[in-house]
Image: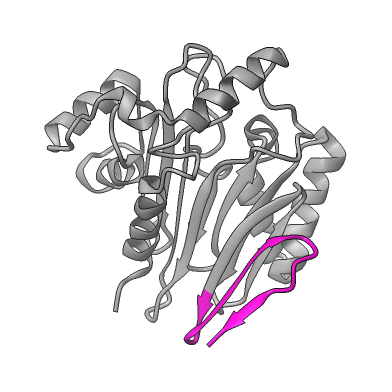
Amino acid sequence: AVGALQASCLLLAQKEDFCFTRVGCGSVLNTEGEVEMDASIMSGKDLSTGAVSAVRCIANPIKLARLVMEKTPHCFLTGQGAAEFAANMGIPEIPAEQLVTERSKKRLEKEKREKGAQKPDSRKNLGTVGAVALDSKGNVAYATSTGGITNKMVGRVGDSPCVGSGGYADNNIGAISTTGHGESILKVNLARLTLFHVEQGKTVEEAAEMSLGYMKTKLKGLGGVILVDKAGNWAVKWTSDSMPWATAKDGKLHCGVNQDTNITDLP
């Protein structure tokens, strides 16, 4: 059986390769029309973690984040250092233009016309992808990857690579991955806050609603979470207009997109 860490990493790498997401191929663009990507991954077994930020010219930042976790004594590499590490690990550099799509160019043009980047209460363009997993041995893991927000400043880093904000995993509690307005998520440590509520005896649904509600009330920040606790109970919650999601448990797939969409239950 595939372990939790491997499952979360593989799933995100597939999403990064799908050019209709906003990570990897198809990432959003910064003010200079460039792709800069962030990612992080964590094992709940021993709290080992790896993260990268502001990386360019690689197809799968989540794979680089995992290498940081497994091949270095560090937790986080950024910019040029991350690029040099990727080269040393044999990760091929790809042309920058290969990650840029016409859709991402049009989104940048639109944001420039509107003179700004994403606002805290923006109900659209939340483009992070994430995964959480619980395996048969009771190990949990999370992985989160993003291109950030359209028209961001060069070098801007959001919540996704930051453990406790973009995600968290602990076998004694569960695992979570977050999405939304990065600056708001960073300010409330959304991932760890949600799991704190689980530690205090709240259900995963209650915990998600409480933390997202706090972020919205305190900062007007919108976002979403996917989480699973150590017993296998899962929840998907968001305050933005929509958030495509899917879960698999006991051979059944559940998925949805909009708040008012009936959950699809496939055998």
239 relative to 153 in the view: left or right: right
On the image, the x and y values in percent for residue 35 come to 42, 25
Q: What colour-coding does the image apply?
A: one colour
* Magenta part of the chain: 248-267
25 relative to 208, above or below: above
Which of the two residues, 167 or 28, is positioned nearer the viewer here? Answer: 28
Q: In which quarter of the image is residue 82?
A: top left
Q: Can residue 180 be seen in this view?
A: yes
Residue occupying image coordinates x 33% and y 59%: 10
Q: Residue 14 in the image: x percent, y percent?
A: 36, 54
- Identify which residue, 30 or 97, lies in the foreground: 97
Kindly tell me whether residue 173 is visible in this rendering: no
In the image, residue 33 lies at what x, y percent? 47, 16
Which residue is nearer to you in this view: 114 or 176?
Answer: 114
Residue that appears at 72% across and 71% down: 203
User: Seen from this angle, which residue lies furthest right?
Assistant: 217
Residue under the image location 29 percent in, 19 percent down: 80
Query: Does the stretch in magenta take in 87?
Result: no
Task: Please give left or right for residue 239 compared with residue 42 in the image.
Answer: right
Total numbered circles? 0
- In the rendered view, tell whether residue 180 sits above or below residue 200: above
Q: In this view, does 125 lie to the left or right of 78?
A: right
Magenta residues, dominant SS class: strand
Asked which quadrant contains residue 225, the reply is bottom right
- On screen, residue 87 above or below 155: below
Image coordinates for residue 189, horizontal then vertical, percent: 64, 41
* Residue 253 on the magenta span: yes
Q: In which quarter of the image is the N terminus?
A: bottom left
